[in-house]
Image (cartoon, helix red, strand yellow):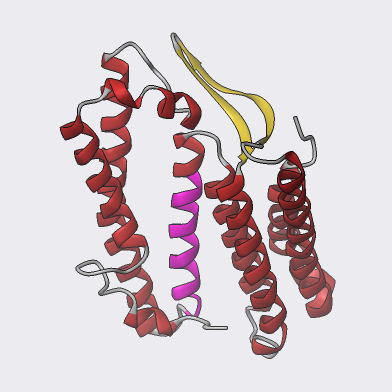
Protein backbone atom coordinates (compact mmCIF):
# COMPACT_ATOMS: atom_id res chain seq x y z
CA UNK A 1 0.00 0.00 0.00
CA UNK A 2 1.31 3.44 -0.97
CA UNK A 3 0.17 6.08 1.52
CA UNK A 4 1.18 9.01 -0.65
CA UNK A 5 -1.00 8.27 -3.69
CA UNK A 6 -3.87 10.29 -2.26
CA UNK A 7 -1.78 13.46 -2.58
CA UNK A 8 -1.86 13.11 -6.36
CA UNK A 9 -5.58 13.82 -5.97
CA UNK A 10 -5.49 16.17 -3.01
CA UNK A 11 -2.92 18.65 -4.37
CA UNK A 12 -5.15 20.06 -7.16
CA UNK A 13 -8.24 19.72 -4.96
CA UNK A 14 -6.61 21.87 -2.27
CA UNK A 15 -5.70 24.40 -4.96
CA UNK A 16 -9.35 24.52 -5.98
CA UNK A 17 -10.58 25.02 -2.41
CA UNK A 18 -8.02 27.71 -1.56
CA UNK A 19 -8.73 29.72 -4.70
CA UNK A 20 -12.50 29.41 -4.21
CA UNK A 21 -12.49 30.62 -0.62
CA UNK A 22 -9.41 32.86 -0.51
CA UNK A 23 -8.70 33.80 -4.12
CA UNK A 24 -9.89 37.38 -3.70
CA UNK A 25 -7.58 37.89 -0.71
CA UNK A 26 -4.31 36.32 -1.86
CA UNK A 27 -4.02 38.28 -5.11
CA UNK A 28 -3.34 37.12 -8.65
CA UNK A 29 0.21 35.99 -7.94
CA UNK A 30 -0.99 33.93 -4.98
CA UNK A 31 -3.78 32.41 -7.06
CA UNK A 32 -1.35 31.40 -9.80
CA UNK A 33 1.19 29.97 -7.34
CA UNK A 34 -1.44 27.91 -5.53
CA UNK A 35 -3.02 26.60 -8.74
CA UNK A 36 0.22 25.83 -10.58
CA UNK A 37 1.90 24.53 -7.42
CA UNK A 38 -0.87 22.04 -6.74
CA UNK A 39 -0.65 20.56 -10.22
CA UNK A 40 3.17 20.58 -10.09
CA UNK A 41 3.09 18.54 -6.86
CA UNK A 42 0.64 16.14 -8.48
CA UNK A 43 2.91 15.81 -11.53
CA UNK A 44 5.98 15.04 -9.41
CA UNK A 45 4.09 12.41 -7.43
CA UNK A 46 2.74 10.93 -10.67
CA UNK A 47 6.30 10.67 -11.97
CA UNK A 48 7.21 8.93 -8.71
CA UNK A 49 4.36 6.45 -9.17
CA UNK A 50 5.48 5.78 -12.74
CA UNK A 51 9.04 5.15 -11.57
CA UNK A 52 7.84 2.86 -8.78
CA UNK A 53 5.88 0.77 -11.28
CA UNK A 54 8.93 0.48 -13.52
CA UNK A 55 10.93 -0.76 -10.54
CA UNK A 56 8.19 -3.26 -9.63
CA UNK A 57 8.44 -4.92 -13.04
CA UNK A 58 5.71 -6.57 -15.09
CA UNK A 59 2.38 -6.85 -13.32
CA UNK A 60 3.24 -4.22 -10.72
CA UNK A 61 0.34 -2.31 -9.15
CA UNK A 62 0.24 0.45 -6.54
CA UNK A 63 -2.85 0.79 -4.34
CA UNK A 64 -4.05 2.89 -1.43
CA UNK A 65 -7.27 1.96 0.35
CA UNK A 66 -8.68 4.89 2.32
CA UNK A 67 -12.00 3.65 3.71
CA UNK A 68 -15.17 1.71 2.93
CA UNK A 69 -17.50 4.16 1.22
CA UNK A 70 -20.63 2.03 0.82
CA UNK A 71 -21.59 -1.20 2.58
CA UNK A 72 -24.94 -2.72 1.64
CA UNK A 73 -25.44 -6.45 1.99
CA UNK A 74 -23.00 -8.27 -0.27
CA UNK A 75 -21.96 -5.00 -1.93
CA UNK A 76 -18.92 -3.19 -0.55
CA UNK A 77 -17.48 -0.13 -2.28
CA UNK A 78 -14.10 1.06 -1.05
CA UNK A 79 -12.49 4.42 -1.72
CA UNK A 80 -9.31 2.93 -3.14
CA UNK A 81 -6.79 4.40 -5.55
CA UNK A 82 -5.12 2.06 -8.02
CA UNK A 83 -2.13 2.72 -10.27
CA UNK A 84 -1.37 0.12 -12.92
CA UNK A 85 0.81 0.66 -16.03
CA UNK A 86 -2.04 2.24 -18.03
CA UNK A 87 -3.22 4.60 -15.29
CA UNK A 88 0.41 5.51 -14.45
CA UNK A 89 0.89 6.72 -18.01
CA UNK A 90 -2.44 8.54 -18.01
CA UNK A 91 -1.80 10.46 -14.78
CA UNK A 92 1.54 11.59 -16.20
CA UNK A 93 -0.26 12.92 -19.29
CA UNK A 94 -3.04 14.57 -17.25
CA UNK A 95 -0.71 16.28 -14.79
CA UNK A 96 2.05 17.06 -17.30
CA UNK A 97 -0.19 18.63 -19.93
CA UNK A 98 -2.34 20.16 -17.18
CA UNK A 99 0.70 21.85 -15.63
CA UNK A 100 1.69 23.37 -18.99
CA UNK A 101 -1.86 24.68 -19.46
CA UNK A 102 -1.82 26.18 -15.97
CA UNK A 103 1.51 27.92 -16.60
CA UNK A 104 0.40 29.28 -19.98
CA UNK A 105 -2.86 30.49 -18.43
CA UNK A 106 -0.99 32.75 -16.00
CA UNK A 107 -0.33 35.15 -18.86
CA UNK A 108 -3.32 34.22 -20.99
CA UNK A 109 -5.83 35.20 -18.29
CA UNK A 110 -3.69 37.94 -16.67
CA UNK A 111 -6.19 40.77 -17.20
CA UNK A 112 -9.40 38.80 -16.74
CA UNK A 113 -11.51 39.77 -13.70
CA UNK A 114 -12.40 36.09 -13.17
CA UNK A 115 -8.76 35.09 -12.67
CA UNK A 116 -9.21 33.17 -9.40
CA UNK A 117 -12.43 31.53 -10.59
CA UNK A 118 -10.73 30.34 -13.77
CA UNK A 119 -7.85 28.69 -11.92
CA UNK A 120 -10.25 27.14 -9.42
CA UNK A 121 -12.16 25.53 -12.31
CA UNK A 122 -8.90 24.36 -13.89
CA UNK A 123 -7.74 22.76 -10.63
CA UNK A 124 -11.11 21.06 -10.22
CA UNK A 125 -10.87 19.80 -13.82
CA UNK A 126 -7.46 18.27 -13.09
CA UNK A 127 -8.76 16.66 -9.89
CA UNK A 128 -11.75 15.16 -11.71
CA UNK A 129 -9.59 13.68 -14.47
CA UNK A 130 -7.24 12.16 -11.91
CA UNK A 131 -10.13 10.66 -9.94
CA UNK A 132 -11.49 9.16 -13.16
CA UNK A 133 -8.12 7.54 -13.88
CA UNK A 134 -7.11 6.49 -10.36
CA UNK A 135 -10.43 5.18 -9.01
CA UNK A 136 -10.40 1.42 -8.44
CA UNK A 137 -14.12 0.96 -9.07
CA UNK A 138 -16.91 2.07 -11.36
CA UNK A 139 -18.45 4.45 -8.83
CA UNK A 140 -15.26 6.50 -8.39
CA UNK A 141 -14.80 6.49 -12.16
CA UNK A 142 -18.34 7.79 -12.60
CA UNK A 143 -17.84 10.59 -10.05
CA UNK A 144 -14.68 11.67 -11.89
CA UNK A 145 -16.46 11.35 -15.24
CA UNK A 146 -19.28 13.64 -14.15
CA UNK A 147 -16.78 16.05 -12.60
CA UNK A 148 -15.07 16.38 -15.97
CA UNK A 149 -18.44 17.11 -17.57
CA UNK A 150 -19.24 19.74 -14.94
CA UNK A 151 -15.88 21.48 -15.42
CA UNK A 152 -16.32 21.48 -19.20
CA UNK A 153 -19.65 23.24 -18.72
CA UNK A 154 -18.17 25.76 -16.28
CA UNK A 155 -15.20 26.61 -18.50
CA UNK A 156 -17.15 26.81 -21.76
CA UNK A 157 -19.64 29.16 -20.10
CA UNK A 158 -16.91 30.99 -18.18
CA UNK A 159 -17.84 34.38 -19.66
CA UNK A 160 -21.51 33.76 -18.93
CA UNK A 161 -22.31 37.47 -19.22
CA UNK A 162 -22.23 36.90 -22.98
CA UNK A 163 -25.38 35.15 -24.17
CA UNK A 164 -23.42 33.15 -26.74
CA UNK A 165 -21.14 31.73 -24.02
CA UNK A 166 -24.09 30.87 -21.78
CA UNK A 167 -25.80 29.08 -24.68
CA UNK A 168 -22.60 27.22 -25.54
CA UNK A 169 -22.25 26.01 -21.96
CA UNK A 170 -25.83 24.76 -21.90
CA UNK A 171 -25.40 22.99 -25.24
CA UNK A 172 -22.26 21.21 -24.03
CA UNK A 173 -24.01 20.20 -20.81
CA UNK A 174 -27.09 18.79 -22.58
CA UNK A 175 -25.21 16.91 -25.31
CA UNK A 176 -22.83 15.40 -22.77
CA UNK A 177 -25.78 14.25 -20.69
CA UNK A 178 -27.06 12.34 -23.73
CA UNK A 179 -23.76 10.49 -23.90
CA UNK A 180 -23.71 10.04 -20.14
CA UNK A 181 -27.12 8.38 -20.26
CA UNK A 182 -25.63 5.58 -22.36
CA UNK A 183 -22.67 5.42 -20.00
CA UNK A 184 -24.91 5.09 -16.93
CA UNK A 185 -27.04 2.40 -18.59
CA UNK A 186 -23.87 0.50 -19.52
CA UNK A 187 -22.55 0.63 -15.95
CA UNK A 188 -25.94 -0.42 -14.58
CA UNK A 189 -26.21 -3.31 -17.04
CA UNK A 190 -22.73 -4.51 -16.08
CA UNK A 191 -23.53 -4.33 -12.36
CA UNK A 192 -26.91 -6.04 -12.76
CA UNK A 193 -25.59 -8.78 -15.07
CA UNK A 194 -22.77 -9.72 -12.71
CA UNK A 195 -25.17 -9.53 -9.76
CA UNK A 196 -27.43 -12.10 -11.39
CA UNK A 197 -24.50 -14.51 -11.33
CA UNK A 198 -23.94 -13.81 -7.63
CA UNK A 199 -21.14 -11.25 -7.96
CA UNK A 200 -22.28 -7.88 -6.61
CA UNK A 201 -19.30 -5.65 -7.24
CA UNK A 202 -18.13 -2.38 -8.75
CA UNK A 203 -14.42 -3.15 -8.34
CA UNK A 204 -12.46 -3.33 -11.59
CA UNK A 205 -10.28 -6.27 -10.51
CA UNK A 206 -13.27 -8.37 -9.44
CA UNK A 207 -15.18 -7.46 -12.59
CA UNK A 208 -12.25 -8.51 -14.80
CA UNK A 209 -11.99 -11.84 -12.95
CA UNK A 210 -15.69 -12.61 -13.54
CA UNK A 211 -16.26 -11.44 -17.11
CA UNK A 212 -16.53 -15.04 -18.32
CA UNK A 213 -19.86 -15.22 -16.47
CA UNK A 214 -21.36 -12.78 -18.98
CA UNK A 215 -22.56 -13.83 -22.40
CA UNK A 216 -21.06 -12.31 -25.57
CA UNK A 217 -24.28 -10.43 -26.36
CA UNK A 218 -24.30 -8.84 -22.91
CA UNK A 219 -20.64 -7.85 -23.15
CA UNK A 220 -21.23 -6.32 -26.59
CA UNK A 221 -24.23 -4.33 -25.33
CA UNK A 222 -22.27 -3.04 -22.32
CA UNK A 223 -19.31 -2.06 -24.50
CA UNK A 224 -21.52 -0.17 -26.97
CA UNK A 225 -23.30 1.71 -24.18
CA UNK A 226 -20.01 2.73 -22.58
CA UNK A 227 -18.81 3.77 -26.03
CA UNK A 228 -21.79 6.14 -26.31
CA UNK A 229 -20.51 7.93 -23.21
CA UNK A 230 -17.04 8.21 -24.72
CA UNK A 231 -18.53 9.53 -27.97
CA UNK A 232 -20.29 12.33 -26.11
CA UNK A 233 -17.31 13.26 -23.97
CA UNK A 234 -14.86 13.32 -26.89
CA UNK A 235 -17.27 15.09 -29.29
CA UNK A 236 -17.43 12.37 -31.94
CA UNK A 237 -20.18 12.03 -34.56
CA UNK A 238 -23.10 12.40 -33.88
CA UNK A 239 -22.53 14.02 -30.47
CA UNK A 240 -20.01 16.56 -31.72
CA UNK A 241 -22.33 19.56 -32.03
CA UNK A 242 -21.16 21.18 -28.78
CA UNK A 243 -17.49 21.33 -29.76
CA UNK A 244 -17.47 24.34 -32.16
CA UNK A 245 -19.33 26.42 -29.57
CA UNK A 246 -16.76 25.43 -26.92
CA UNK A 247 -14.55 28.18 -28.36
CA UNK A 248 -16.75 30.63 -26.44
CA UNK A 249 -14.77 29.77 -23.31
CA UNK A 250 -11.08 30.39 -22.51
CA UNK A 251 -8.86 28.33 -24.83
CA UNK A 252 -5.30 28.27 -23.46
Q: Residue at x 50, y 28 (%)?
A: 205
Q: Quadrant of residue 149?
A: bottom left
Residue 186 covered by magenta stretch? no
Looking at the picture, how far across and down is residue 225, in whole percent? 24, 46
Q: Residue at x 65, y 85 (%)?
A: 109
Image mark count: 0
**Position of residue 32 in the picture relative to residue 132 (left or right):** right
> Residue furthest toward the front?
58
Q: Quadrant of residue 124?
A: bottom right
Kindly tell me whether residue 157 is visible in this rendering.
no
Kindly tell me whether residue 177 is visible in this rendering.
yes
Looking at the picture, how far across and down is residue 235, in whole percent? 32, 69
**Position of residue 115 in the picture relative to residue 174 (left or right):** right
Q: Residue at x 83, y 73 (%)?
A: 30
Residue 152 covered by magenta stretch? yes
Which stretch did the figure color magenta?
A: 143-159
Looking at the image, residue 207 lies above or below residue 87: above
Q: Residue at x 73, y 42 (%)?
A: 5
Q: Report the predominant secondary structure element of the magenta stretch.
A: helix
**Position of residue 108 in the picture relative to residue 3 (left or right):** left
Image quadrant in which the C terminus is located: bottom right
Front-most of residues 135 and 154: 135
Front-most of residues 158 and 251: 251
Q: Quadrant of residue 59?
A: top right
Looking at the picture, how far across and down is residue 37, in whole percent? 80, 66
Image quadrant in which the N terminus is located: top right
> Residue furthest toward the left?
217
**Position of residue 41 in the picture relative to residue 109 (left or right):** right
Amino acid sequence: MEGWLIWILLAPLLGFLINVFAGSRIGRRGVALIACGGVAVSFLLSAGAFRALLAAGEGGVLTQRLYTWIKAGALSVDFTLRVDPLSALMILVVTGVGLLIHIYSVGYMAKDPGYARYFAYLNLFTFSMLLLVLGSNLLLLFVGWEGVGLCSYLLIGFWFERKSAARAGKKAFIVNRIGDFGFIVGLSLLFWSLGRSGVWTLDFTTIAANMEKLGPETITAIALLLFVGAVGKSAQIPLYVWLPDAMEGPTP
